[in-house]
Image (cartoon, rainbow, N blue to C red):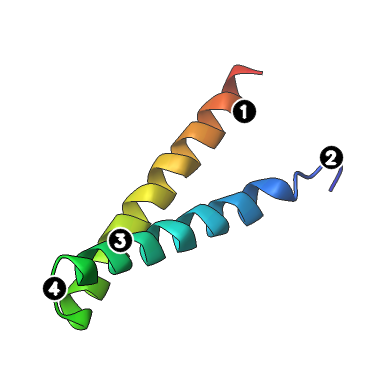
């Protein structure tokens, strides 16, 4: 386990949680119910995590 990057998974989790809370708050601000805002936020969180993961692995492949 040489030269393992501990920041990548921490950054991935942090971005996913920030996106989820931001989308939930924006949805509730625009008048959505908490359940529907939470559902949309979960979808946005998964999309953000996938995009972030693809960008991190693409940068690693080029090295």
- Pointers 4 and 3 in contact (C-beta within 8 Å): no
* Rendering coords of residue 14 (x, y %): 56, 57
The nearer-to-camera label among 1 and 4 is 4
- Which corner quadrant of the image does residue 42 belong to? bottom left
Q: Which mark is drawn over residue 3?
A: 2
Q: Position of residue 35 (x, y in %)?
A: 20, 81
**Numbered disc in front, either 1 or 3:** 3
Residue 41 locus on image (x, y percent): 29, 65
Q: Earlier in the sequence, mark 4 or mark 2?
A: 2
Crowding at mark 1 (Cα within 10 Å: few <14, some 14-19, many 20+): few
What residue is shown with label 3?
Answer: 23
Residue, x 84% and y 48% (percent of image)? 1
Mark positioned earlier in the residue sequence (1 or 3)? 3
Label 2's element?
loop
Q: CA distance from mark 1 to mark 3?
A: 29 Å
Tell whether label 2 touches label 1 (CB within 8 Å): no
Q: Residue 60: which disc?
A: 1
Q: Secondary structure at mark 3?
A: helix
Mark 4 lies on a secondary structure that is: loop
Residues at discs 1 and 4 in contact (Cβ within 8 Å): no
Mark 4 and mark 2 in contact? Answer it, CB < 8 Å: no
Mark 1 and mark 2 lie on one chain; the one further toward the N terminus is: 2
Per the image, the residue denoted by label 4 is 32
The mark total stands at 4
Residue shown at 55%/59% (left/top)?
13
Q: Residue sitting at 75 percent across and 44 percent down?
A: 5
Q: Earlier in the sequence, mark 3 or mark 2?
A: 2
Q: Is residue 54 above or below residue 49?
A: above
Disc 1 element: helix
Nearer to the camera, 27 or 56: 27
Give me the C-alpha separation between circle 4 and circle 2: 45 Å
């Amino acid at each position: 386990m040489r030269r393992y990057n501990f920041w990548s998974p921490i950054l991935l989790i942090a971005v996913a949680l920030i996106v989820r809370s931001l989308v939930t708050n924006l949805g509730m601000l625009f008048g959505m119910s908490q359940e529907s805002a939470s559902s949309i936020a979960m979808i946005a969180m998964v999309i953000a995590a996938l995009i972030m993961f693809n960008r991190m692995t693409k940068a690693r492949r080029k090295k």
